[in-house]
Image (cartoon, rainbow, N blue to C red):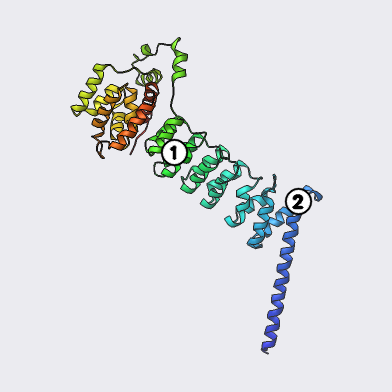
Amino acid sequence: MSATPETSDAIGAAAASLMATERQGHDQLIRRLADFLLAGGTQLAPNELALAETALVDLLPIADTAFKRRLAERVSPLESAPSALLSALLAEPFEVCEPILAEGLCLTNCDLVRVADEADQHHRLCIAGRLELSRVVCDALVTRGEPDVLASLIANTGATLSTHALEAMVRRSSAKPEFIRPLLQRHELTPWLAHLMFFWADGEERALILKRFPVDRRAISEALADAVEIDSLLQSDDPALHDTYRLLRRADRMSEGAQLRLMAGVADESAQGALATSAGISSTSAAWIIGDPGGEPLAVAGKAMGLSREAFQQVAMALSAARPAGALSENEMERTIGLFDSMTMDRADSILHFWDRIIASETFA
């Protein structure tokens, strides 16, 4: 005997009612278990809490997204959260676990590193914005070199950046110049990394680097003066030691004869070798100074050699003529001379030889 339409409708309604009742029961059970764990846990013995946690984690897959998100919001402010529940919530899609990743007090460095290693970019970007981040977590976040994550970390004053993380960011700034200015605001930035960025920074950023990281050795030179004869140590046959001693020695002004030889070398189209010999730097460094599109390296080199203002202008014009962009324009020369005038010879000399060390250890594309 076939069922009538009325009978089919009744069966369907009964089934729907049963499913709704079952769903309501599931929801009530999950909510009550969550309350036991997160609100009334002190009323239960440890073994009962463990049982409630196990049941809640088992039922979590059938809970709707909105409930799981609210559960994550309740877990976030807890300094200690049930471990199995925390792991289950962190394994949920980003829209669920975001409150814990963004502000969760219960997350350890190990938790954050694991998420950074295993989850996707949304998770890492969220972690990068947390109020406090340790060096080990920052190192995990920079591994993939994701620009958005790096930018968030650089801007996050609550993130403690290691030298490893900073170096990764500084090197990435050669392709992402928008990183340079905020990196210069980081208190962890070292002179080495700041001057490494100098090679691809613009004029304003270079001025900031020279102002904030002057590589001043005056106090060191004064402290060593009565105990060590740096000039005698410069006779060392070890190139590495020679470079170290040269970095510590105070600048000596070029003689008039040396200036004439430099001018003659530039005029004879052996500018790179002439500059390297006169400034006491490598041929590679001399090539970079001559080929640099800005006039700042020329100003530093000229001041370090003790050139007069007039001699520097002549040398700078002659050297810059070898650039792909041609000789310095009138405005560029004016800015370059301004930098030349603003520096002391000893400070310029220390910066020049600091650059020489950096260039010797780096390969530039």
| Image coordinates for residue 358, horizontal then vertical, percent | 38, 30
Q: Which residue is mark 2?
A: 49
| Image coordinates for residue 167, horizontal then vertical, percent | 45, 36
Callout 2 environment at 10 Å: few (<14), some (14 to 19), or many (20+)? many
Looking at the figure, which quarter contains the C terminus?
A: top left
Looking at the figure, which quarter contains the N terminus?
A: bottom right
Label 2, label 1: how many angstroms apart (C-alpha)? 49 Å
Q: Quadrant of residue 346?
A: top left
Residue 3 visible in the current orientation = no
User: Where 86 falls versus 137 (above or below)?
Assistant: below
- The mark nearer the N terminus, 2 or 1, is 2
Q: Amino acid at mark 1?
A: Val
State the residue at coordinates (63%, 45%): 107
Q: Amino acid at mark 2?
A: Leu
- What secondary structure is found at the residue carrying circle 1? helix
Q: Which residue is mark 1?
A: 170
Callout 1 environment at 10 Å: few (<14), some (14 to 19), or many (20+)? many
State the residue at coordinates (47%, 37%): 184
State the residue at coordinates (73%, 71%): 21
